[in-house]
Image (cartoon, grey):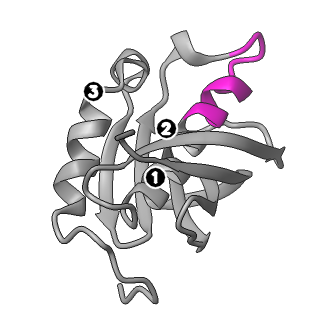
Amino acid sequence: MSSPFTPSDPDFARRVQQSFAAQAIMQTIGARLAEVDVGRVVIELPYATGLTQQDGFVHAGVSATIMDSACGYAAFTLMPADARVLTIEFKTNLLAPAAGDCFRAVGQVRKPGRSVTVAEADLFAVSGDDQKLVATMTGTLMTVLPRD
């Protein structure tokens, strides 16, 4: 996939993978980093009953968690090598019950910036060959640089 963005760090994919591996929440819920590209990240989460709400749908908080990380890591791909990423705001729209065998959060940068980046994520419920959009997120991410 071709990206309109240029990463400032050519080793961005390794940095994203290392940072993702350090997120205990992703390990706890069983999420995995499926794709990393310039300005774009995909996180997958298998369905697990321990992640559901009272009706058996994946909980909105879990959906928001993987979309937040997808937005954050999409932004992180464009940040300098010594940067950290921090979410400073997000808005989620829940469009349909999160029912499926697996969930794919696709995060993409919409507007990169030196200190603030805006990204969006779509969450798809996947069952067999079918996928359905169940939620969206717009996130604002901050580039955190080391202090001198």
In the rendered view, would you say 26 is above or below 147? above
Q: Is residue 2 visible?
A: yes
Q: Which residue is painted at 24% across and 68% down in the image?
A: 9
Name the residue at 68% across, 52% down.
140
Quadrant for the C terminus, please.
top left
Magenta region includes residue 69: no
What residue is at 43 percent from the left and 51 percent from the top? 73
Front residue of 111/64: it is: 111
Which labelled disc corresponds to residue 100?
none
Whole-Å distance between the Cαs marked 3 and 2? 25 Å
Task: Name the kind of residue labelled 1 in the image.
Answer: Gly
SS state under label 1: loop
- Find disc 3 in the rendering and name its residue: 22
Residue 11 figure quarter: bottom left
Of labels 3 and 2, earlier in sequence is: 3
Asked if the residue at tag 1 contacts the one at tag 2, i.e. Cβ–Cβ closer than 8 Å, the answer is yes
How many numbered marks have been drawn onto this rendered protein structure? 3
Q: Which mark is residue 128?
A: 1
Q: Position of residue 44 (x, y in %)?
A: 41, 44
Q: Locate the N terminus by quadrant.
A: bottom left
Question: Label 3 crowding class (10 Å Cα cut-off): few <14, some 14-19, many 20+?
Answer: few
Secondary structure beneath disc 3? Answer: loop
Q: Viewed as shown, does residue 20 lie left or right of 61?
A: left
- Quadrant location of residue 98? top right
Percent coordinates x, y for residue 25 in the rendering = 43, 20
Residue drawn where x is 41% and y is 46% of the image: 145
Q: Position of residue 30 (x, y in %)?
A: 37, 24
N-terminal label among 2 and 1: 2
Is residue 54 magenta-colored?
Answer: yes
Q: What's the magenta region?
A: 53-65
Q: Which secondary structure, mark 2?
A: loop
Circle 2 sits on which residue?
101
